[in-house]
Image: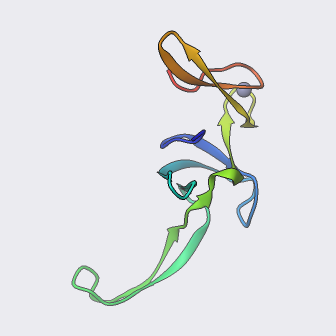
Amino acid sequence: MKIRRNDIVVVLRGRDQGKQGKVLQVLVEERRAVVEGVNLVTKHLRKSQDNPKGGIIKKEAPLAVANLKLFCAACKKGVRVARVLEGAKRVRKCKGCGQVFDS
Ligand SMILES: [Zn+2]
């Protein structure tokens, strides 16, 4: 997967197109990711012991990784990444400016 937890990504498609956010969770099997503040859906909570009143909350729904791009601080935009070997480590590099994302 080109996207990992704590990455900053840009949304390419959908309601939140153009938004940026931090990746909170990656669902590898589904090829989806949860991005902070993006793709919020309204959830109606049933009354429970934790939450005796029930209610309505906003929660991030997972987005397809195909609709996300890694944000490069140097390029100031979403970029494509290359996976390269640096020593014994596989790192991700910006295809625009060559910046390494995993240090
Ligand atoms: Zn770059």
Q: Position of residue 94 (x, y in %)?
A: 69, 26
Foreground of the two, 26 or 72: 26
Q: Nearer the viewer, residue 68 or 21?
A: 68
Q: Quadrant of residue 96?
A: top right
What colour-coding does the image apply? rainbow
Tell me if 3 is positioned left or right of 47 in this view.
right
As drawn, the residue found furthest toward the top would be 87
Q: Quadrant of residue 70?
A: top right
What residue sits 70% from the left and 62% below the top?
16
Please, which residue is most extreme toward the left here?
A: 49
Looking at the rendering, the quadrant in which ligand 1 lies is: top right
Residue appearing at x 35%, y 88% in the figure: 54
Q: Looking at the image, is 40 positioned above or below residue 101?
A: below
Residue 24, percent from left and from top:
47, 51
Q: Look at the picture and state if 14 lies above or below 67.
A: below
Residue at image coords 21%, 84%: 49
**Quadrant of the drawing holding the N terminus:** top right
In this orientation, which residue lies closer to the viewer: 71 or 82? 82
Q: Position of residue 26 (x, y in %)?
A: 49, 51
Q: Position of residue 73 (x, y in %)?
A: 67, 30
